[in-house]
Image (cartoon, rainbow, N blue to C red):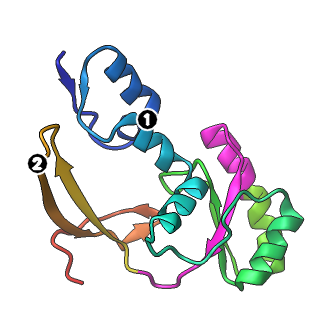
Amino acid sequence: ADAIHPGYGFLSENAKFAKMCKECNIKFIGPQYKSIELMGNKAEARKLMKKAGVPVVPGFEGIIDNEDHGLSIAEKIGYPVMIKASAGGGGKGIRIAYNEKEFRIGFNTAKAEAKACFGDDTLYIEKFVEKPRHIEFQILADSYGNVIHLGERECSLQGKNQKVIEEAPSPA
């Protein structure tokens, strides 16, 4: 094969797969593996985006050491908060907490789910935004410097923190 388009989901976000394609001189139609690595850890991605001046939801810039550390951060941010798996995706490893009791339960559940799903139980915390709009946009670029914007899509209709419908263009 000269090139591989991984579709969406697991392989499209797998830095090892993208790197393997590069090592085998097969064009990976997607981001460079280093970009996938950078964005794969959500806590690190938050830091990177903040450093680049991209607005992010208020939260803690780092990994949560333990439940009590997380609780003190949640109290500083203010409830409700989202407890999220750093290596997460697909709506896994996310819990919402409106108070201390829910935080303690959610922290341990999210940690166990993150370990089971991703082999990595590190968590981070950010403010929970009620009734958010989830708008995505897509950029397509080639190796010759040509770049196009493919428009935006509305992804706010979700179940269990996983997109159910993507509507393009967004009515927002």
Q: Quadrant of residue 108?
A: bottom right
Q: Residue at x 15, y 72 (%)?
A: 169
| Secondary structure under the numbered disc 1 in the rendered image | loop
Image quadrant assignment for residue 3: top left
Earlier-in-chain disc, 1 versus 2: 1
Q: Identify the residue shown where x is 53% and y is 76%.
A: 57
Q: Position of residue 93 (x, y in %)?
A: 62, 55
Circle 2 is placed at which residue position? 146
On the image, the x and y values in percent for residue 70 come to: 80, 67
Amino acid type, mark 2:
Asn
Do the CB atoms of the residues marked 1 and 2 lie less than 8 Å apart?
A: no
The boundaries of the magenta stretch are 110-132
Looking at the rendered structure, the secondary structure element under dot 2 is: loop
Q: Amino acid at mark 1?
A: Asn
127 over 5 or under it: above or below: below
Viewer-nearest of discs 1 and 2: 2
- Please tell me whether residue 29 belongs to the stretch shown in magenta: no
Q: Residue at x 69, y 56 (%)?
A: 123
The residue shown at (63%, 72%) is 126
Is residue 157 found left or right of 50 in the rendered image? left
Neighbor class of circle 2 (other Cα within 10 Å; few <14, some 14-19, many 20+) is few
Which residue was labeled with disc 1? 14
Look at the picture and state if 105 lies above or below 89.
below
Q: Relative to residue 155, is residue 147 depicted above or below?
A: above
**Percent x, y of residue 68:** 89, 67
Between residues 115 and 150, which one lies in front from this camera angle?
150
From the top left corner, tell me how far across and down residue 163 is, in percent. Answer: 38, 62
**CA gap, disc 1 to disc 2?**
24 Å
Identify the disc placed on residue 56.
none
Quarter occupied by the C terminus: bottom left
**In this image, 108 relative to 58: left or right?**
right
